[in-house]
Amino acid sequence: MTLPAATPLIIAHRGASGERPEHTRAAYELAIDQGADLIEPDLVMSRDGALVVRHENEIGGTTDVADRPEFADRRAYRTIDGWTVEGWFTEDFTLAELKTLRARERLPTLRPANTAFDGREPILTFDEVLEIAREGSARTGRVIGVAPELKHPSYFAAAGLPMEDVFVAALERPGLTAAAGLLVQCFEVGTLQRLRTRTDASLLQLVAAVGGPADRPDLTYAAMTTPEGLAEVADYADWIGADTALIEVRPGEASALITDAHAAGLKVAGWTFRAENLFLPEIDRNGDDPAMYGRLRGRLARFAGHGLDAAFMDQPGLK
């Protein structure tokens, strides 16, 4: 099945994460009911090789693991993509252990209403998110796509957890993906290049405003978003997923990125559209309260006018 042709497509960023704790069933189901075209799970790995859904493999801020004395000795330091991180990491837990944890709001000060849902839901697996999309498609009569992001695949491979192989095996299991269009994302280049030969799913190369892919120290995102760089990305990917700062160099003033990407044959998704003033440029804010909703609809309409093909949104109901 193919994804709908609406412009821009709405990708529910970790579900309706502005209104429910991210990556929970409640967040995904609300996003579907609000009309999202795709739901987005970030994929990390358990010690026993399961694909689990968390924004990062460090889960101290998104689960109750810090309150669980039986896991106190799992607190550790890890170096991930060149950064030293302290906390609790999914790769130190079996799937059964992770399933005993409960999700909580990642930004409780900014989104206090979401804390009412803390402790209600377990960590999801990739298979469970695919099932949520299939159920949502049946419930709404729309095709609900899934946009998984593979997080830190080189890091996991070095730890003996071959994320790419496990992911491809998941796609090959009968019935799991039949009801959902797939848009597979990654910041790493090599992962997407290898997946190009292993799956027919659409592939999206993520790029940030600074830095470069963790698996390519010789390459910067700035180089990847030149016309020449975009042509190279188009050899293995169908989309580019860009920080909105790369699309609007100043509020209301578009860069050449979308035009250049379209010329290379790539569609463009922008990340991340969030309603709170804290995340908005001054032109789109409403008052001074960081948590107050600004003019997100106007911002999205402006980017659509630039030619944006898809938008990652924390509040997909505000499309």
Image (cartoon, rainbow, N blue to C red):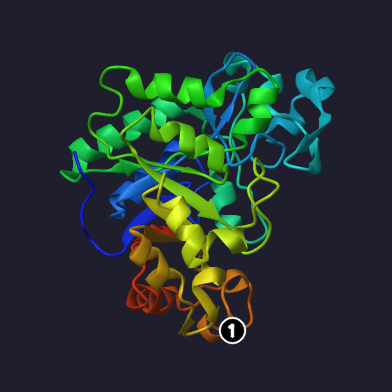
Residue 135 lies left or right of residue 162; in this view the side is left
Q: Residue at x 46, y 25 (%)?
A: 167
Closer-to-camera residue (170/33): 170
Closer-to-camera residue (27/184): 184
Residue 108 drawn at (x, y percent): 65, 54
Residue 253 drawn at (x, y percent): 48, 85
Q: Residue at x 49, y 62 (%)?
A: 228
Residue 91 lies left or right of residue 16; in this view the side is right
Residue 249 drawn at (x, y percent): 55, 79
> Label 1, on which residue?
282
Corner quadrant of residue 67: top right
Q: Amino acid at mark 1?
A: Glu
Question: Can residue 271 be seen?
Answer: no
CA neighbours of label 1 inside 10 A, class few (<14), some (14 to 19), many (20+): few
Residue 297 drawn at (x, y percent): 38, 74
Question: Can residue 166 be seen?
Answer: yes
Q: Residue at x 53, y 86 (%)?
A: 283
Residue 109 lies left or right of residue 170; in this view the side is right
Q: Secondary structure at mark 1?
A: helix
Residue 42 lies left or right of residue 8; in this view the side is right
Closer-to-camera residue (184/53): 184
Q: How many marks?
A: 1
Closer-to-camera residue (79/51): 79
